[in-house]
Image (spheres, rainbow, N blue to C red):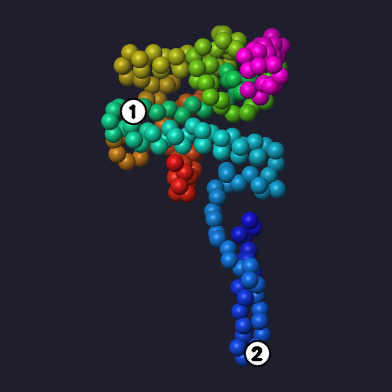
Amino acid sequence: MRDASSYGSWCAQTYAFFLLQVGFEDCLFLNVHVPKAFNLQDKSLTYKDKLEGFKTVFGDCFFNFGIHRDANLQRKFSPLYLYFFNVTGGPSLTSLLTDYRDVFNPVIDFGVSLVKMYVKEILLGIPREDLGVNHYDDVQLTFPITTALGKGHEFYNLSKSWVKLLVDFAADVPTDFMGEELMPVPEKGSWKYLHINKRPESISPTFVNRVKFLQSIGVQ
């Protein structure tokens, strides 16, 4: 693999008038464009850049790709509502996973990790490194059992708005999150996700273009 920002070697050829042979046999190159988010081999990337890239690849391959693909199929048969949960810095289980160590057995090890997270973040108030949004964080905002999310907390009103959205949706009444309405996905054409964060809006997330790229190279 080589950087395609400059031309590769010439193919071997002979100048008939001068009987001069130039070029190289190793001259066949295939130009492949890879979105920047997927290119983690660039030596100029910092730790933070690589961490962001890893989160992007992991999230797209394990969650975003399948959800977006399946939503395109399901919307033809039933009403479909999609949200993109992107609340960072709030209740999260990221520490539970990053502090996990395979020592005894999974049950005990996860228990130890949970205790460590509770002591550091709740009892001692030590902020964790922001590693992005983790699977199950939306449930954490609903039932913040591992975070002291009482009145006056930065995410208290956000949590109340999130719970209200879930209750209204279950009651089959018009549903919104902090004033931004949750709209059904149309049966045809493009669609948007309700962006769940401190400034909610209906968006087409950046991962949509990355999903299209993965589909273009045959990812199923």
| Residue 192 visible from this viewpoint | no
Indicate whether 176 appears above or below 150. below
Q: Residue at x 34, y 28 (%)?
A: 80
Q: Residues within 10 Å of mark 2 (few under 14, many from 20)?
A: few
- The kind of secondary structure element at disc 2 is loop
Q: How many marks?
A: 2
Q: Position of residue 63 (x, y in %)?
A: 49, 32
What residue did someone put label 2 on?
A: 18
* Quarter of the figure with residue 127: top right
Q: Residue at x 43, y 21 (%)?
A: 178
Rounded to the nearest angstrom, the CA distance separating label 1 from label 2 is 71 Å
Of the pair 194 and 208, the residue shown nearer to us: 208
- The kind of secondary structure element at disc 1 is loop
Residue 184 highlighted magenta (yes or no): no
Using residue 159 as the reference point, say whether residue 123 is left or right of it.
right
User: Hey, what amino acid is under mark 2?
Assistant: Phe
Q: Which is closer to the viewer, label 1 or label 2?
A: 2
* Quarter of the figure with residue 128: top right
Indicate whether 4 appears above or below 165. below
Identify the magenta region. 97-124
Q: Position of residue 186 (x, y in %)?
A: 30, 34
Mark 1 touches mark 2? (CB < 8 Å): no
Of the pair 11 and 186, the residue shown nearer to us: 11
Q: Position of residue 81 (x, y in %)?
A: 36, 27
What residue did someone put label 1 on?
A: 80
Indicate whether 122 appears above or below 86. above
User: Hey, what amino acid is under mark 1?
Assistant: Leu
Which residue ends up furthest to the bottom in the rendered image?
17
Indicate whether 135 appears above or below 205. above
Q: Residues within 10 Å of mark 1 (few under 14, many from 20)?
A: some
